[in-house]
């Protein structure tokens, strides 16, 4: 959220919206919704720590995991247009977020056009991330290629704050990952075991390390 929170100049005065409009590090407990589907959208959020899963309810009232958000990524930005949140955002583990009130942000933007430009830049960055996330789970021919592409996408996104492109602490459980990818839990576990046996990944509880990036990429994109 740095493009929004950094001080801006208005004449000879620097104005920071952080003190007035940003609630930094709001804590969200494990399994607690940040917001629910169809609630009025009054704010956008940036994940500071932890992870959120994004879910929808099917017509049969079954939960479908449609995505995950990690530190540095936005939640709820896609509700700016229609003013209602499009999914449920639920904390995985103990998380914290930065919150920007949309009404106050809009009023500030009218006075300081630079703020609106910064918001557009931020939304553009988020859109690029969403395209990468989408492409990682589309048009894959096998369950193995789907999981490999999904894991590579997670490593790329998390490397921005975990400072490693090959090691990852993943708080998301296997049930949520299997749900998102459309697998059975047993199928996911079988493929993970196969990747470990082939020396592609090392998995110790929620700590995952890529051991052979080239082979994992070959599976993902072949």
Image (tube, grey):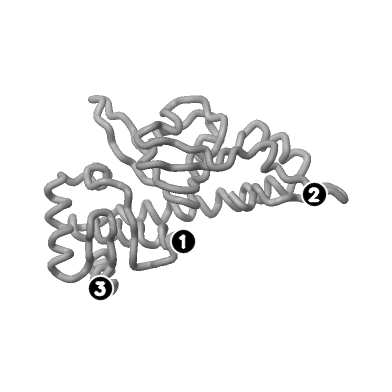
List the residue tagged with mark 1.
Answer: 160
Q: Residue at x 23, y 72 (%)?
A: 215
- In this view, 182 is above or below 42: below
Residue 140 lies in quadrant: bottom left
Q: Secondary structure at mark 3?
A: loop
List the residue tagged with mark 2.
Answer: 14
Disc nearer the start of the sequence (2/3): 2
Question: Circles 3 and 1: CB distance less than 8 Å?
Answer: no
Say few, some or many: other residues with alpha carbon within 10 Å of mark 3 (under 14 / 14 to 19 / 20 or more).
some
List the residue tagged with mark 3.
Answer: 212
- In this view, 110 is above or below 142: above
Q: Viewer-proximal residue, 220 or 16?
A: 16
Say few, some or many: other residues with alpha carbon within 10 Å of mark 2 (under 14 / 14 to 19 / 20 or more).
few
Q: Viewer-proximal residue, 110 or 166?
A: 166
Residue 203 vs residue 72: left or right? Answer: left
Q: Residue at x 65, y 48 (%)?
A: 5
Residue 198: percent from left, percent from top: 15, 70
Give the CA distance from mark 2 to mark 1. Answer: 29 Å
Give the label on residue 64, or none. none
Q: Residue at x 46, y 51 (%)?
A: 71
């Amino acid at each position: 959220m740095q493009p929004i929170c950094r001080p801006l100049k208005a004449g000879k005065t620097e104005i920071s919206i952080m003190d007035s409009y940003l609630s930094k590090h709001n804590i969200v407990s494990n399994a607690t919704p940040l917001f629910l589907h169809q609630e009025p959208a009054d704010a956008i959020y940036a994940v500071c720590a932890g992870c959120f899963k994004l879910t929808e309810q099917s017509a049969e009232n079954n939960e479908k995991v449609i995505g995950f958000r990690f530190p540095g990524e936005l939640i709820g930005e896609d509700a700016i247009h229609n003013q209602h949140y499009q999914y449920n955002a639920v904390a995985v583990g103990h998380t914290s977020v930065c919150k920007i009130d949309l009404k106050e942000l809009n009023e500030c933007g009218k006075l300081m056009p630079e703020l609106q430009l910064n918001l557009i830049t931020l939304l553009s960055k988020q859109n690029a991330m969403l395209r990468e996330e989408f492409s990682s789970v589309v048009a894959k021919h096998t369950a193995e290629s789907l999981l490999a592409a999904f894991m590579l996408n997670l490593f790329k996104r998390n490397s921005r704050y975990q400072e490693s492109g090959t090691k990852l602490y993943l708080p998301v459980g296997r049930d949520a990952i299997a749900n998102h990818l459309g697998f059975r839990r047993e199928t996911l576990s079988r493929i993970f075991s196969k990747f470990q046996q082939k020396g592609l990944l090392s998995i110790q509880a929620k700590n995952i390390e890529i051991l052979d990036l080239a082979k994992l990429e070959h599976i993902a994109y072949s």
